[in-house]
Amino acid sequence: MAKVVDQDKKMNWRGLSKLIRDTNPSKPLVAAAIAMSTIGTIAGLIVPFFTKNLVDQLSGSTLSPGVITLLIAAFIVQAIFSGLSMYLLLYIGETVVARLRERLMKKVLSLQVEYFDQNRVGDTTSRIVNDTGVIKDLVSNHLISLLTSTLSIVGSIGILLYLDWKLTAILLAVVPIMMIGIRFIGKRMYKVSKGLQEETAKFTATITQVLSEVRLVKFSMAENVEEENGKNGIKNVFGYSMKEAKIYALLMPLMTLLLMGVLVIIVGYGGVRVSTGELTAGELVAFLLYLFQIIIPFSSMARFLTAIQKAMGATERLQFLLDHESEERLNGEEVKNPAQVLSFNNVEFSYGKEMVLKRASFEVPPGKVTAIVGPSGSGKTTTFSLIERFYRPQEGEIKLGDNEISRFSLVSWRKQIGYVSQESPLIAGTIKENIVYGLEKEVSDQDIEVAASQAYALPFIQDLPNGLDTEIGERGIKLSGGQRQRIAIARAIVRNPSILLLDEATSSLDSTSEVQVQRALNNLMKDRTTIVIAHRLSTVVHADQILVMENGRVSAQGTHEELFMNSNLYKELAQQQFQMEESS
């Protein structure tokens, strides 16, 4: 088991090293930071040596101005170069984490939809924000300080051996004990740090979910439930934090106890040797100062060990994200003629074990309106997801004309598609930002107003305090459902798509809003290949063709009149709806 842990740590160390190298930190800046840290450390090593001469001269009443000047110069050099190196290290750390976050953002945006089906948003957010912060802390505060700490320890021990090898031998006897203790605690810290990061990510995911659906929480009166979930998350994070605190509480006092014990022995033994004349007072003072030059770096090395265990745990989680398959957005051909038949040929698809689409086959003629109806779970929304290429069919093929749609680049293919759903997803920002969202080309205010007018959105936009520049809140919460739908339609009009997907776009609206939205949709649908999912059959009775989906396949197709005569399922759906409309 220990071998497995060591192997995992070795792999994580390689992964951490590669993760940092991939951010391509400036080699000249890293070299400058190392050089400045080294100069500052060497200046610090010189200080006790000059202090020895100063003490010896004071005891002999022969104070040399040169010694004082050199001592002050060493202090100044140490302060200046330590400050500069600290700034450079912080700059390098911030650069590394910024580039790493850029890479992660790019990766997250390129991930396939399946990733988001299986992983909570808050967990991914925690990886981008918290785990990268752990790596920044390692780079900025610990990584290069390891070099200076090592240099300080080695240099101090070398000078101490020169000053008095007997006192140095007492110090060296403790070093192996300290290293064994640090190694033992380091193994425990790796497990604790990894667990702490996992629990922090889970807690972040819980908070993100609650805040994003706070209206559902309040409406459902689930405050007590979510408060309890939050308490459990906090309790778990607290538990791991306290385990980490226990390790710190064990490590630091142990090191302090050993070093203070050595200090007492050296002061006592050194005092005896000064009294016998074997050692000068200046040499004893210098020895004690060098001892502190060892104690402080040893503490830094212990903190470095803790930081690297955390960073290796973070690396493992980040690598899990980076290793996921991405969408290749640019690979493939351009769509040159979107005005062709869109066809499903024996398409099969499942999200897990149970098939959602079972050898589904149908054709969507260009420039016509095709409606898809059927009971819930029959595969209507999945059909849209496959057309948008959020998923790939496990069997069969989807074609535009004679070409499989997988041959086209994602960018080129999705440019052909406009999508309006019943949820009307909007982003926090202005109405204008929402209408032009995702467009790379410049769109004039006049074009935006034309699109808003065609979407029957311009009148209510002009009544708002700031018109197109009105902030609509998170997910457009400041707008009504009908207003959100019309903004989504205006967005689709600006995109000028060749293929239009309407997913129950009027199902959640009142009758007044539905009339306005339906007019806007009629403007949008002109001369476009349109596929409509609708529960209200009254909105699709005039479609050029209607597909009836049942148990993952198309069981019938035709016009409203043909299906009413020939399809039992369609007739049943129609009769149920007409009865509902009459009763309402």
Image (spheres, rainbow, N blue to C red):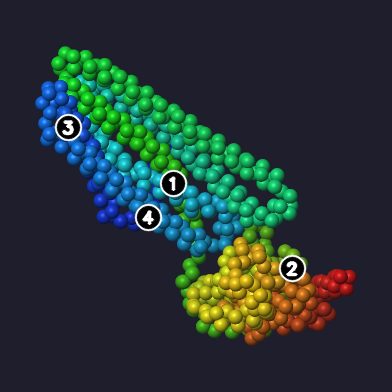
Residue 399 visible from this viewpoint: no
Look at the numbered disc 4 and give the secondary structure of its residue: helix
Left or right: 470, with 51 as reference point:
right
Query: Looking at the image, do the residues carrying marks 2 and 4 touch, with CB atoms under 8 Å apart?
Result: no
Q: Amino acid at mark 4?
A: Thr
Q: Which residue is mark 1?
A: 134
Dot placed on the residue nearer the N-terminal end, 1 or 2: 1
Mark 3: give few (<14), some (14-19) or many (20+) Cα within 10 Å. Answer: many
Q: Nearer the viewer, residue 521 or 401?
A: 521
Q: Amino acid at mark 2?
A: Ser
The answer to whether 330 is drawn above or below residue 86 in the figure is below
Q: Which residue is mark 3?
A: 50
Dot placed on the residue nearer the N-terminal end, 2 or 3: 3
- Which quadrant holds the C terminus? bottom right
Q: Nearer the viewer, residue 124 or 214?
A: 214
The answer to whether 531 is drawn above or below residue 97 in the figure is below
In the picture, the disc for residue 95 is 4
Left or right: 436, with 216 as reference point:
left
The answer to whether 313 is drawn above or below residue 338 in the figure is above
Q: Nearer the viewer, residue 140 or 267?
A: 267
